[in-house]
Image (cartoon, rainbow, N blue to C red):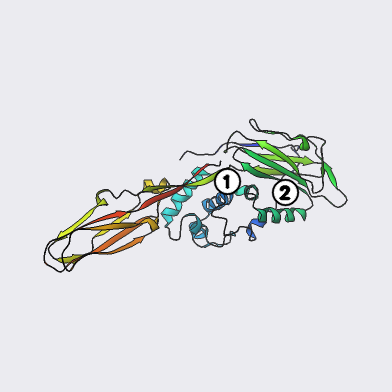
Amino acid sequence: MRNLALPIFLFLSATAGEAVAQDRCGDVLREGTFQTSQYRENNYFQQIIRSRFAKATYDEAKSDTSGGFGIPLGEIVIGGDFSQSDFEKKQQSIRDELDVDVISRQEIDVALSSGDPEIVRAWRECMRGRNGLTARFEVFSAKEVVLKVEWLGFAGVPATEILSNLMLPEGVTGDVGCLAQGAQLDRDIACDVVLQLPDAFTTMVVAVRTKNGATTAYLPKRIKLSKEVIPYDFGADSEIETAGEGGSSRPTISKRLTDDQISQGWRLDPRSVTGSIELKHAVDNGFCDDMRVNADEYQLNIDYRWLNNNGLGMHCVFRPRANLVRSRWVHMD
């Protein structure tokens, strides 16, 4: 897969000597705000989950549930059972797809971009306790977002003044009037700046400087995981014929994904592993049945019973079936 990483445009309206960084209340992401019903579907949560997985150790991916999701990262990203080799290959594929280091530093901004009401509420309450300036992005579509800036206010300071114009990177447009130099921000009244972007992969960091403080906001890629499904190729084992005039056996098919398939993100769908048995020549007291399946995301074993107690010729054909699946990052609509 091609690397989707593009340059991150950094536009700071603070002077070089001023510290823009602040406590952005990122701890709210570790205090139960990730809802278990949403983390598998929310595209921004998925970016955070995968960036954490890409920085975890094998043991952490297997057992650590402290991330706020309720189950280990590895179970979310790969599945219930995976080897050290599987873990390392998945880590590398994630690093090739996502700006892992940036997402790790900007987790709270990525989560806020989801618009999840519980996270936004918890973050605003936390920031209100710090009596400062807030900024976050809210995504409308792949190419349209709104920058929301709000003054939560110090005691006795019901408003603050913007000290310098908000700068936008090339290709990004919008009316930044309420964030122009000299504009006033009143307490609890958000300044919303709608921005148009050239594509879903443009990211940026903006900074806002006022007389009473400064803050930043990071806009992540507007991407989503798209699921692909293709039939697994059993090759020479696509049909197994068993024939004879007596006896019993359990013909078996064993397959494991190749390193190339794994590196390209493909996994077996264990629920899709099955097969059909055709009895081409039947005899009394003869059986081709009792198919058994044992499969995970990387390998499968299928067998069935061939039993002929008749002594006459019996002929069976077994055709296995399975699907490969993978998720890839594509641009949002």
Q: In the picture shown, does residue 173 fall above or below 315? A: above
* x then y, percent, for residue 305: 24, 65
**In the image, farthest residue toward the right:** 156
* x then y, percent, for residue 182: 83, 36
Q: Quadrant of residue 33?
A: bottom right
* Disc 2 secondary structure class: loop
The mark that comes first in sequence, 2 or 1, is 2
Tell me what residue is drawn at x 56 percent, y 37 percent.
Answer: 6
Residue in front for this viewpoint, 296 or 22:
296
Is residue 26 among the parts visible in the rendering?
Answer: no
* Disc 1 secondary structure class: helix
- The residue type indicated by label 1 comes to Asp
Residue in front for this viewpoint, 1 or 115:
115
* x then y, percent, for residue 137: 67, 44
For the N terminus, the quadrant is: top left
Label 1 sits on residue: 101
Residue in front for this viewpoint, 220 or 66:
220
Label 2 sits on residue: 22
- The residue type indicated by label 2 comes to Gln
CA gap, disc 2 to disc 1?
19 Å
Tell me what residue is drawn at x 86 percent, y 48 percent.
Answer: 158
* Circles 2 and 1: CB atoms closer than 8 Å: no
Label 2 neighbourhood size at 10 Å, few (<14), some (14-19), many (20+)?
few
